[in-house]
Image: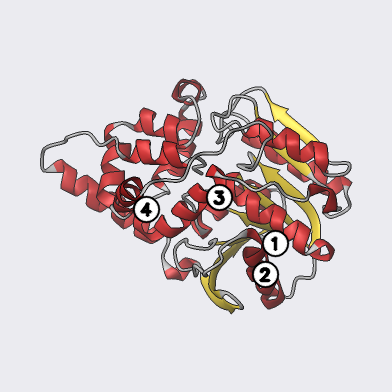
């Protein structure tokens, strides 16, 4: 769930020097677990007008299209959408463009992604769906609501990594910077070494959440956040998507929010280091009748707020008559 290209480059450059035979064993174990998470046995592949699209499903009930954040894939979508499964929803979790087995078309923008998602819904026989996007996943979620208003039953951007007025754009990488970033993104060992040697530093940088807040929340939340961080492995299988998200969030576009007519609930947290609370207020201020929730703390991965957050989503979908 990364959202800033500079943070990503700096975090991936932080690799401690480690020694001992246990390093190789630990790395192999982590990569074995990562391979199991993204096994083709856990997902399906369909052909869309923009190439192959991978997806997985869980649960039953009203469908929710859950679009993962930066560093994710269908596996992250399933994990983060699991609280909705527990509340009686059917989660549909695609791997967005450039992630895992999904294609990376020449134009990977939100309109193209919306078309591929519409093809997925056609494949599943779903006419209308609630669409939720976390972090950079909010970009295609909003794009879908604008491009396919008749098919959007509700829009649910969570910690949206989108445009906010007054926030300066991040300047594009130069050739050397881009080469370094791409090399790091293709090295599973570099990333594994960084999160193993400096987990708090990497969590603060890449998940935009205060590590002290995570530790104070107790073992269950520590384990959940650790799973999010480790879930970025294998980073080499997510590199194109990561770079695309870095570009999209570094110089974000401003949507025609006034054309969104679906019931909308926007959620963020005040201490999110990616400043998504500013983005959430901007979205809610422009979409007609949108509802806004900004929790005072919890960071980018809503530490200590998961039950409260998804109870709010559930209540909103029931109030709108969708669930």
Q: Nearer the viewer, mark 1 or mark 4?
A: 4
Please provide percent x and percent y for residue 287: 83, 44
**In this image, 160 relative to 223: left or right?**
right
Residue 97 appears in the rendering: yes
Give the class, few, some or many, for how many residues have Cα within 10 Å of label 1's Cα (few <14, many ≥20).
few
| Residue on which the image places disc 3 | 248
Mark closer to the chain start, 3 or 4:
4
Q: Marks 2 and 3, how far apart in space?
A: 18 Å
Disc 1 and disc 2 in contact, CB within 8 angstroms: no
Q: Nearer the viewer, mark 2 or mark 4?
A: 2
> Outermost residue, left direction?
20
Residue 234 appears in the rendering: no
Residue at 18%, 48% in the rendered image: 25
Specify the label residue 60 is tagged with: 1
What SS does tag 3 mark?
Answer: helix
Specify the label residue 235 is tagged with: 4
């Amino acid at each position: 769930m990364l959202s800033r290209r500079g943070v990503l480059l700096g975090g991936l450059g932080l690799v401690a020097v480690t020694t001992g035979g246990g390093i190789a064993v630990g790395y192999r174990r982590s990569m074995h677990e990562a391979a199991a998470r993204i096994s083709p046995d856990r997902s399906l592949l369909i052909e869309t007008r923009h190439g192959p699209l991978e997806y997985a499903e869980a649960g039953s009930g009203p469908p929710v299209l859950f679009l993962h954040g930066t560093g994710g894939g269908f596996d992250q979508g399933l994990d983060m959408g699991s609280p909705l499964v527990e509340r009686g929803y059917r989660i549909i979790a695609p791997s967005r463009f450039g992630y895992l087995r999904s294609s990376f078309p020449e134009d990977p923008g939100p309109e193209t992604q919306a078309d591929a998602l519409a093809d997925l819904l056609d494949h599943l026989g779903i006419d209308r769906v609630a669409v939720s996007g976390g972090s950079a996943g909010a970009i295609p979620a909003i794009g879908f609501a604008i491009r396919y208003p008749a098919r959007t039953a509700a829009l649910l951007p969570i910690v949206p990594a989108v445009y906010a007025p007054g926030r300066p754009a991040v300047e594009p990488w130069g050739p050397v910077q881009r080469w370094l970033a791409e090399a790091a993104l293709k090295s599973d060992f570099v990333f594994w070494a960084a999160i193993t040697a400096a987990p708090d530093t990497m969590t603060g940088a890449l998940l935009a959440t205060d590590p002290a807040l995570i530790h104070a929340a107790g073992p269950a939340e520590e384990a959940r956040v650790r799973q999010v961080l480790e879930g970025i492995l294998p980073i080499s299988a997510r590199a194109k998507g990561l770079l695309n998200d870095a570009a999209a969030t570094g110089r974000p576009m401003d949507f025609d929010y006034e054309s969104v007519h679906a019931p909308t609930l926007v959620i963020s947290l005040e201490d999110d280091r990616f400043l998504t609370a500013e983005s959430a207020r901007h979205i809610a201020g422009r979409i007609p009748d949108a509802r806004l929730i900004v929790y005072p703390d919890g960071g980018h991965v809503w530490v200590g707020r998961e039950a409260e957050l998804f109870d709010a989503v559930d209540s909103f979908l029931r109030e709108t008559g969708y669930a």
